[in-house]
Image: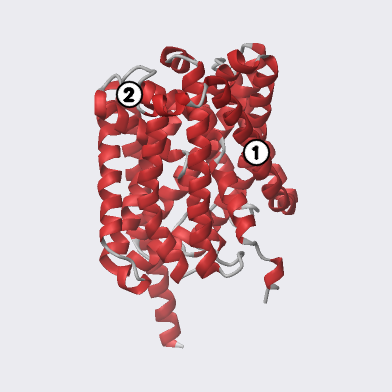
Amino acid sequence: MVDDSAKLSLAGSVSLGTGVMVGAGIFALVGQVAGLAGGLVPAAFLAGAVVVAFSSYSYVKYSGANPSSGGIAMLLKDAYGPGVVAGSFSLFMYVSMVVAESLLARTFGTYMLRPFGLQGSAFLVPALGVAAIALAAVVNIFGNTLVERSAAVTAVAKIVGIAALAIAGLLAAGWSSLGTTLSGGSGEPPPQGIIGFLAGTTLCILAYKGFTTITNQGGDIREPKKNIGRSIIISLAVCTVIYLLLTVSVVGSLSVPQIIESRDYALARAAEPLFGAWGVGLTIALAVVATLSGLLASIYSVSRLYSMLQDMKQAPGLPDKIKHQPLLITAGLAILVTVFFDLTQIASLGALLYLSMDIAVHLGIIRRLHQDIGAKRWVPVAAIVLDVAVMTAFIIVKAGQDLLMLAVAAAVSLAIFGAQWWAVRRRDQDEEVNDGQHSRT
């Protein structure tokens, strides 16, 4: 039995959860959101926080009643049984997390090349991204203890640095800019009206979805039935404040066309007129720390999720002689996404897969688990309505801008369901054979 003093405190859990959320999302997504929501970027991030607040209810109630290291995979298994549906949406979550690693990797490459004016390089950005993923994988193979110990330190460094940058930017822009930018008074309206604003909100959700990793802390945190829920709520509140301050300072510093033009490195561009070269340097340093530490932690946790799905016989494996299979599969998939998709496409794919999984979680709570975990049905119903609203708007916008990306998302979804059907069918056949052999003996 693990000594309780060796487990995470509430503060430690919050620092880890917030550290996962405050990562590549905020560095890469501000410009992407501006292209959809116009000058309402801060309002879109606030709307994203509202959507995630409703969504978090299901995870808080389930984790409070059933704290474990299985997190979402266990929730889906309890809601749907160990079959195709639970396995498929668990893989949706897995793939969305792999896609998030690619977002981290390409953001690392973009910010590393910013001082040399090469941030738009079609070759160097993915090349540096692949190198970052490979380095993170090697460190995980030989030093996963270092990964665990460094997570809290880098999380605090990211949060403090970004908060300082945001507050300084807001002071330079003036506190009055907070209310003005939230109402869109100082910027351009969304190009496609409310549909564009909701589509931008969809991308903002990616900057908060890291809270789901807290659900995996059931075996590692003190008083999990009480502290997992508290950790999720506090982490979301902290990130909401940081994102609002940061986006207000960006919108106060740059025009919407400037944010869109520099969409992959908008935070560094925004720091330049306000703080000069030192502000740009600080932003780039923060981005490098955030992306590399995020990759280390993400590959570690996502590989554990894949290993658990393999144990449940709901995910394929490589030949038995190959070691570290979950890690190699995770890093390999992240490298493929990094090479073949840009930041906009990666964010789109991640958002669609994550929201699909989120809807399945809420349906499972409503249909089967609400009484067991003491959940009120109306909250997950509201979460589904909000998820469907933002995702529908996002699909409408993308259908006119990038139909190929929607086709890729649909193909990935179908491939996951197909692979899961095959894996479950094979597992059931193996169990029948084993049962027959046991009955004969």
Residue furthest front in the image = 176
For label 1, the residue is 160
For residue 348, say whether it is visible.
Answer: no
Residue furthest bottom in the image = 441
- Between 103 and 131, the one lying in front of the other is 103
Amino acid carrying label 2: it is Asp
Where is residue 194? Give x, y as percent. Answer: 25, 29
Where is residue 369? Give x, y as percent. Answer: 33, 68
Amino acid carrying label 1: it is Val
In front: label 2 or label 1: 1
For label 2, the residue is 402
Which disc number belongs to residue 178? none
**As drawn, 42 above or below 304:** above
| Quadrant in the rendering for residue 10 | bottom right
- Between 280 and 407, the one lying in front of the other is 280
User: Residue 407 vs residue 112: left or right?
Assistant: left
Per the image, label 1 sits on a secondary structure element best described as helix
Where is residue 45? Give x, y as percent. Answer: 42, 35
Alpha carbon separation for disc pair 2 and 1: 37 Å
Q: Residues within 10 Å of mark 2 (few under 14, many from 20)?
A: some
Q: Earlier in the sequence, mark 2 or mark 1?
A: 1
User: Residue 257 vs residue 306: left or right?
Assistant: left
Name the residue at 44% across, 76% down.
434
Per the image, label 2 sits on a secondary structure element best described as loop
Where is residue 227? Give x, y as percent. Answer: 54, 64
Color scheme of the displayed model? secondary structure
Q: Residues within 10 Å of mark 1 (few under 14, many from 20)?
A: some
**As drawn, 375 above or below 152:** below
* Quadrant of the frame with the N terminus: bottom right
**As drawn, 312 above or below 386:** below
Name the residue at 29% across, 26% down.
196
